[in-house]
Image (spheres, rainbow, N blue to C red):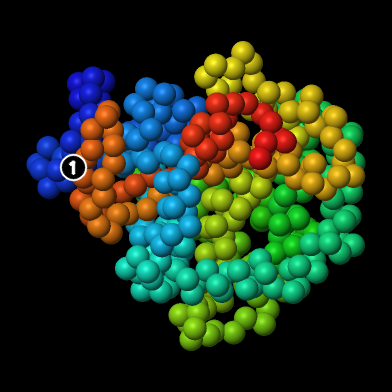
């Protein structure tokens, strides 16, 4: 307790530099777990960087927060482990470990970073069937998708929508989140939005019954939702998108069941909440974070009421600037494959191979060295 209250980050730096020390082995895991539950939130990260500097140690990881470091990490090969951002995952809850093997992309390493090649193969399979296929592209703009968008616009006009606690944002039958559930499942999987029986299950799964703690260690031991997860997997397996699925050697013999199980986890952890949270931010369900030095938070409605909705570029700039200031995904991670150096508190430290490194997208998005001194401010016309 004394270490956590007085010198947690200094101790974590020492422990990461000396991972085999008995003190590191005993005290670092509980400190990392305790801090991991909240450190990834945008304003907590900003406060840490303001206090600790550009690079620091927290949640049992080294945080390299500059735009260039984050960009290099995201575009280069990554070694990974069973982590979701800064939080440890429960291996037994990952797809599809209970039946075959681990196919969870965020925990598999790239081949160029020492992986077996399964990450790239499984990702190609996922993209081919659910993101880039010709039928997916066709469904994005067909009559059914347009009707869903028209219904969303009607709900926005008719339902209270001044903040996230009102009906447009938290309803389970009308409003934003039911739209996201239907739109994503129609476009990606081809599931008929009027298939009420299937959407009863999907709404239960995505709108409240299953928290992502099912996938996290140690809560996953308590939060057991295997029954409904298997129901969603079966819905995906029977969907038009996977109807003609064929096992391919170049995709590491990924099965229909494995792809469906992977899709469930990706949709629940990232796909559905990421889409919904970005849409909430863009439409003003909540204001942008009040970053240091700002007198108040941005009220998005003041901006978007002045947008030229006929200008695709202007709407795009607005959405991207909202996403920059409040990233739907705040943190990812990687594992170092060789010793590396980082400057902290004006000194250079060399950390060993195997060190977990946080990739804080939320901090890179407001890095003053990259975005300028007004990085915390909303400016949709910025370069």
**Residue 7 higher or lower than 32, as above or below:** above
In the rendered image, the quadrant that contains the C terminus is top right
Q: Is any atom of residue 192 visible in this view?
A: no
- Can you give x and y, in whole percent of width and height, for residue 102 in the image? 40, 67
In the rendered image, the quadrant that contains the N terminus is top left
Quick one: 261 or 347, which is closer to the camera?
Answer: 347
Q: Residue furthest top?
A: 295
Quick one: 383 or 130, which is closer to the camera?
Answer: 383
Quick one: 353 or 219, which is closer to the camera?
Answer: 353
Q: Which secondary structure, mark 1?
A: helix
Q: Quadrant of residue 9?
A: top left
Task: Give the residue at x 44% y 31%.
Answer: 45
Q: Which residue does the numbered mark 1 point to in the structure image?
A: 17
The total number of labels drawn is 1
- Can you give x and y, in whole percent of width and height, for residue 38 in the image? 43, 32
Looking at the image, residue 245 sits to the left or right of residue 342; the answer is right
Task: Give the residue at x 62% y 81%.
Answer: 245
- Can you give x and y, in whole percent of width and height, for residue 261 in the image? 53, 66
**Residue 104 higher or lower than 307, as above or below:** below
- Can you give x and y, in whole percent of width and height, for residue 340 in the image? 26, 50
Task: Give the residue at x 74% y 63%.
Answer: 187
Callout 1 crowding tier (Cα within 10 Å): few <14, some 14–19, many ≥20? some
Task: Give the residue at x 26% y 20%.
Answer: 5
Looking at the image, residue 255 sits to the left or right of residue 283; the answer is left
**Residue 237 higher or lower than 8, as above or below:** below
Q: Is any atom of residue 35 visible in this view?
A: yes
Q: Quadrant of residue 155?
A: top right
Quick one: 84 or 324, which is closer to the camera?
Answer: 324
**Residue 19 higher or lower than 115, as above or below:** above
């Amino acid at each position: 307790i004394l270490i956590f209250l007085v010198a947690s980050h200094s101790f974590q730096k020492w422990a990461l530099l000396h991972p085999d020390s008995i003190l590191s082995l005993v005290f670092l895991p509980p400190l990392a777990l305790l801090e991991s539950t909240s450190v990834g939130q945008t304003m907590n990260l900003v406060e840490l960087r303001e206090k600790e500097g550009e690079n620091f140690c927290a949640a049992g990881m080294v945080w390299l927060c500059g735009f260039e470091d984050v960009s290099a990490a995201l575009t280069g090969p990554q070694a990974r482990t069973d982590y979701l951002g800064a939080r440890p995952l429960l291996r037994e809850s990952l797809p599809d470990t209970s039946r075959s093997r681990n196919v969870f992309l965020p925990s598999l390493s790239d081949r160029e970073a020492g992986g077996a090649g399964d990450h790239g193969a499984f990702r190609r399979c996922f993209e081919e069937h659910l993101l880039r296929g010709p039928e997916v592209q066709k469904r994005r703009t067909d009559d059914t998708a347009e009707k869903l968008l028209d219904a969303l616009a009607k709900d926005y006009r008719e339902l209270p929508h001044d903040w996230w606690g009102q009906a447009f944002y938290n309803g389970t039958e009308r409003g934003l989140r039911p739209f996201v559930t239907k739109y994503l499942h129609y476009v990606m999987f081809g599931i008929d939005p009027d298939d009420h029986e299937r959407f009863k299950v999907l709404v239960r799964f995505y709108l409240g019954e299953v928290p992502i703690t099912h996938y996290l260690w140690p809560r996953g031991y308590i939060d057991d939702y295997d029954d409904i997860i298997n129901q969603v997997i079966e819905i995906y397996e029977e969907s038009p998108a996977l109807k003609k699925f064929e096992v391919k050697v170049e995709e590491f013999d990924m099965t229909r069941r494995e792809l469906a199980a992977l899709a469930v986890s990706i949709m629940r952890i990232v796909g559905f909440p990421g889409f919904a949270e970005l849409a909430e931010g863009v439409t003003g369900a909540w204001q942008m974070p009040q970053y240091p030095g700002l007198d108040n938070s941005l009220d998005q409605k003041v901006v978007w009421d002045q947008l030229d909705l006929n200008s695709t570029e202007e709407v795009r700039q607005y959405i991207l600037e909202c996403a920059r200031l409040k990233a739907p995904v705040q943190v990812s991670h990687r594992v170092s494959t060789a010793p590396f150096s980082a400057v902290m508190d004006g000194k250079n430290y060399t950390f060993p191979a195997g060190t977990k490194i946080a990739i804080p997208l939320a901090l890179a998005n407001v890095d003053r060295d990259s975005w300028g001194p007004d990085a915390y401010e909303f400016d949709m016309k910025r370069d």
